[in-house]
Amino acid sequence: MQESELWLTKIFNDYLAVPGNWFLSLVRLPHQARPWADFIVMQLLVVALLVVLVLILRGRLSFDRPGKLQHVFELIYEFVHGQTEDQMGHDGEKYLGYFATIFLFILFCNLIGLIPGFDAPTMNPVVPLGCAAATFLYYNMVGIQSNGAKYAAHFVGPFWWLAPLMIPIEIVSHLARPLSLTIRLFANMYAGEKVTAVFLSLTYFVVPAVFMGLHLFVALMQAYIFMLLTMIYVAGASAHEH
Amino acid sequence: MTKKLILLTVLLLVICPMLFAQSADVAAQTKSNAAIGAAIGMAIASGLCGLGQGKAVAGATEAMARNPGAIGAIRTMLILGLVLIESLALYTLVIVVRSSGLLG
């Protein structure tokens, strides 16, 4: 069965098959004829786009006469910083880098799906799983870093004699967090794309465009919600019991 | 209310034999049963999530009307609540898509 490829993936597979197979051999997977998958190429594109954007911004930062790019990034920074302050007060500034990164990465990944000729990497369930796994590792690391060995006290609950009941419940609820993050992001992106495609096959002109507008709104909201939930989990993990 | 209930039950009982008296092709039968089950499950999930989101929006607008100073905080809570409820319907959609194979 011939899977359709994006034009960028076709270029990668035609000319860069050897480095692709080298990456596969790093993780002991067998070589394939066309190793680059759509979502990997799209993720690399998003990363390259973000790095180029930030490097251009770096060259144009100015205190007296800020340009348009600086204004846009100041808006983004104010937004993320405001949310962090809402969730965890002033202690949250050390975690701002991860929140802004995950927000911009998921935002760009979702939005690039709206451009014809490109596919959203978050439409494949693996990519939201990666983001959710990264968030899971991050908030646990933050918990261990800020609370030390007392992080395990979070799992015990309010009374020590409730521990045999609370520990399985807490572990399952903690494991449900990356699961729900993954499914939420994947299902929203996948459903948005499929609904637009279904309506495109049913009718034409205005109606699929309306669903695409809804998909755009949902893409923005899902990136925001992922970041907000990350902040809530980090705030919960780094909360100091006074 | 009772008359409507009786009418609905009779309709259900009349339709059931028609559903079961279909072709003997097992694979297609299972697939079409899965599709019907998926559609009913998705309808229930969407309906209940619609009710939940309606309650959330109603509470939020009433709170905003009572306390215009807290509109920012209420809006944040509203958006967060709506997205979390929405994701419950989407979990069902994932199961539907996986089981019915209609949308790939």
Image: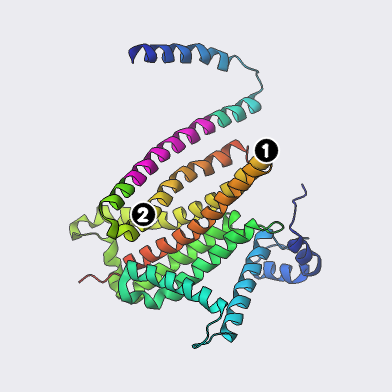
Image coordinates for residue A190, horizontal then vertical, percent: 58, 49
Q: Is residue A192 left or right of residue A164?
A: right
Q: Residues within 10 Å of mark 1 (few under 14, many from 20)?
A: few
Colour convention: rainbow
The span shown in magenta is B37-58
Q: Which residue is mark 1?
A: A203
Which residue is drawn at the image coordinates 41% and 50% (left, top)?
Answer: B84
Q: Main secondary structure of the magenta part?
A: helix
In what quadrant of the picture does the N terminus of chain B appear?
top left
Give, as a three-letter code, the residue at label 2.
Ser
Select label 2 or label 1 by which is in front.
1
Q: Position of residue A52 (x, y in %)?
A: 63, 77
Answer with mark 2 or mark 1, whichever residue precedes in sequence: 2
Element carrying mark 1: loop
Give the image location of residue A151, x and y in percent.
Answer: 30, 69
Does residue A3 appear to the left or right of A60 in the view shown?
right
Read off the chain for label 1: A
Residue at the (76%, 66%) spot, across then down: A12
**Residue A7: numbered disc:** none
Give the residue at mark 2: A173
